[in-house]
């Protein structure tokens, strides 16, 4: 699925866009609006972005889990070398490598998730200043069939709301954020 980004200046525009897209068959669960004014979104019955869209805990957790896995396997490797050198009497086998790798990945995911709770989602970092300025980020998740319909609707009915790019809905653990914004306002 692809995510299309639009930036509206007012909550009325964001509400009108979401209602028009729903009328064309885009499900409410595929429409998310991110703004500083969470209460305004609620009173306008506009589907606001959830913590997965706002915070970076999944992305950062995945990154830290990968690092934890490497550290766990490296510790098992060091223990194995110590066993071969006769420094320890433990029997280090494949299960020890797997177990320490698993424990390292779990600890890394936990720690990364906690760190990610303090960071803005890396996919919306380019809209940080506009959201802080009071604008409304409209995220539309569409499949290949609906994408031309959504773009056409937005171009003809809402030409004053600019298309600001697109991306995938898949979280890529290896994609590094360009700037880290800590979550403080929304």
Image (tube, helix red, strand yellow):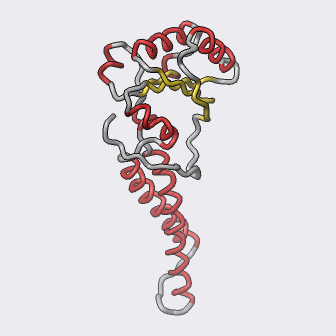
* Looking at the image, residue 126 lies above or below residue 146: below
The residue positioned farthest toward the bottom in the image shown: 86
> What is the total number of numbered labels drawn onto the structure image?
0
Q: Nearer the viewer, residue 134 or 147?
A: 134
Q: Quadrant of the N terminus?
A: top right
Q: Residue 93 at x, y = what percent?
A: 57, 75
Seen in the image, is 85 located left or right of residue 113?
A: right
Q: Quadrant of the C terminus?
A: top left
Q: Nearer the viewer, residue 130 or 61?
A: 130
Q: Residue 75 at x, y = what percent?
A: 49, 75
Q: Residue 85 at x, y = what percent?
A: 55, 92
* Looking at the image, residue 149 lies above or below residue 133: above
Residue visible at 53% across and 18% down in the picture: 161
Q: Residue 80 at x, y = what percent?
A: 55, 81
* Looking at the image, residue 172 lies above or below residue 82: above
Residue visible at 49% across and 43% down in the picture: 122
Residue visible at 53% across and 9% down in the picture: 20
Seen in the image, is 70 located left or right of residue 113?
A: right
Q: Within the image, what quadrant is residue 51 found in?
A: top left
* Looking at the image, residue 48 lies above or below residue 43: below
Q: Nearer the viewer, residue 115 or 131?
A: 131
Seen in the image, is 140 located left or right of residue 44?
A: right
């Amino acid at each position: 699925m692809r995510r299309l980004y639009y930036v509206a200046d007012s909550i009325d525009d964001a509400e009108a866009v979401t209602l028009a897209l729903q009328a064309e068959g885009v499900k409410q669960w595929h429409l998310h609006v991110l703004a500083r004014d969470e209460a305004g979104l609620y009173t306008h019955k506009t589907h606001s972005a959830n913590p997965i869209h706002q915070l970076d805990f999944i992305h950062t957790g995945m990154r830290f889990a990968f690092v934890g896995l490497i550290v766990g396997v490296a510790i098992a490797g060091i223990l194995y070398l110590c066993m071969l050198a006769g420094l320890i009497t433990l029997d280090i086998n494949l299960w020890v490598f797997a177990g320490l790798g698993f424990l390292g990945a779990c600890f890394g995911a936990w720690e990364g998730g906690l760190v990610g709770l303090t960071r803005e989602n890396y996919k919306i970092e380019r809209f940080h200043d506009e959201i802080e300025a009071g604008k409304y980020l409209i995220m539309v998740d569409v499949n290949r069939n609906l994408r031309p319909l959504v773009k056409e609707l937005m171009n003809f009915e809402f030409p004053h709301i600019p298309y600001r790019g697109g991306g995938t809905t898949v979280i890529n653990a290896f994609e590094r954020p360009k700037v880290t914004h800590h979550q403080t306002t929304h």
